[in-house]
Amino acid sequence: MTLAVTVTHRFGDFALDASFASPGGLTALFGASGAGKTSLLRIVAGLVRPASGRVEVDGTVLLDTARRLCLPAHRRGVGYVFQEPRLLPHLSVRHNLGYGRWFSRRGGDPGEFGRVVELLDIGRLLERRPAALSGGEAQRVAIGRALLARPRLLLMDEPLASIDEPRKAEIIPYIERLRDGSRVPIVYVSHALDEIVRLATTLVVLEHGRVAAAGDLATVLGRVDLPILARRADAGVVLDVEVAAHEPRWQLTVLRCQAGLLHVPAIEAAAGSRRRIWVRARDVSLALSAPADSSILNQLPAQVVRLAASDGASVDVQLDCSGATLLARVTRLSAERLALRPGLAVQALVKGIAFERAE
């Protein structure tokens, strides 16, 4: 399921000029407040008609101003999940979900209701009214309502922004299930990097109404020339890994990825299963040769690709580890003493405690 978007539009003094393509899955629109994320989403949804542009979902053209084609919102087959659930307070959960099916008027599989209820684990909520739901429960119902409208595209505008951390932790696994179990492409707006790392397959970075970068999540996160990402305290990269083995004696798990073998604190996962992990730049150090006596278990041969320009005390270094990208954050003094430069062979030293499960 593919998505291609190209739009230009002016909102007062703000100019939006953005273009990106996605192979499907979950595409995250990431950027600071005012970058144009929600404006772009509203154009895709058909709530705003742009000065020029084209939107195509899996071969179906929803907008093409060059051909004077602009399907109205109700004919686009687009589901929209807002920051607030916006459930109808006088209806039960069951009837709120049914409203989505009725509104679509597209017919559907009689078993679809049950599958969506199971996917989002909301069966026990069906007879409740919205006032009796937690924030996370209400948002899951809102997602279910959008899905039951049988959309060809699902738009989610910061759906976790108004939810506290415990409820956010509750709902993210359901969005993961939706990403992995549904053929509906998702465009997900957020300025929270932890959500992006956990959920996205494709990342689009917006700055001042323009696309600063777009592509595979790991590739974009690994760049050091994007200040909005590289200068963050939590800057880092995502690695896809396979659980290679467990070492119960040491309470460690061995992960295999393109960069090599990695030892991390024990996780509950079967050998051979796949995971996504987040490695933060601040937890990667560099050496010119592998230390013979070191407490750091993860020592990976690497090559310097690029150094980020910095006016501060630290420098972010982009590394190639056997084809995988890592980021290291070192002081400017260390970078000078090691004479770091593109092409230099180094050892990337990664603390085991630096690994955080992204899913």
Image: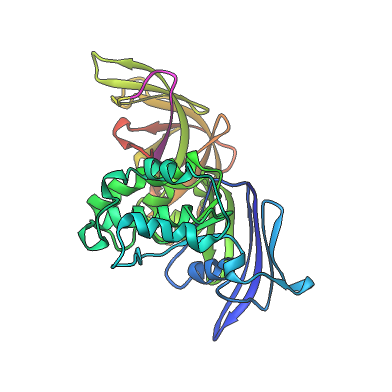
Is residue 336 among the parts visible in the rendering?
A: no
Residue furthest to the right in view is 67
In the image, is residue 263 part of the stretch drawn in magenta?
no
Is residue 114 among the parts visible in the rendering?
A: yes
Whether 12 is drawn above or below 192: the answer is: below
In the figure, residue 128 lies in which quadrant?
bottom left
In the figure, residue 10 lies in which quadrant?
bottom right
Whether 28 is drawn above or below 325: the answer is: below
In the image, is residue 271 part of the stretch drawn in magenta?
yes
Left or right relative to 26: residue 328: left
Left or right relative to 323: residue 167: left
Residue furthest to the left in view is 132
Left or right relative to 232: residue 124: left
Kindly identify the residue that appears in the image at 64 percent across and 76 percent down: 50
- Pinpoint residue 159: horizontal percent, then vertical percent: 38, 59
Q: Relative to the observer, which residue lies in front, 328 or 138?
A: 138
Residue furthest to the bottom in view is 12
Whether 195 is drawn above or below 182: the answer is: below
Kindly identify the residue that appears in the image at 38 percent across and 38 percent down: 359
In the figure, residue 358 lies in which quadrant?
top left
Span shown in magenta: 269-279
- Pinpoint residue 152: horizontal percent, then vertical percent: 59, 54
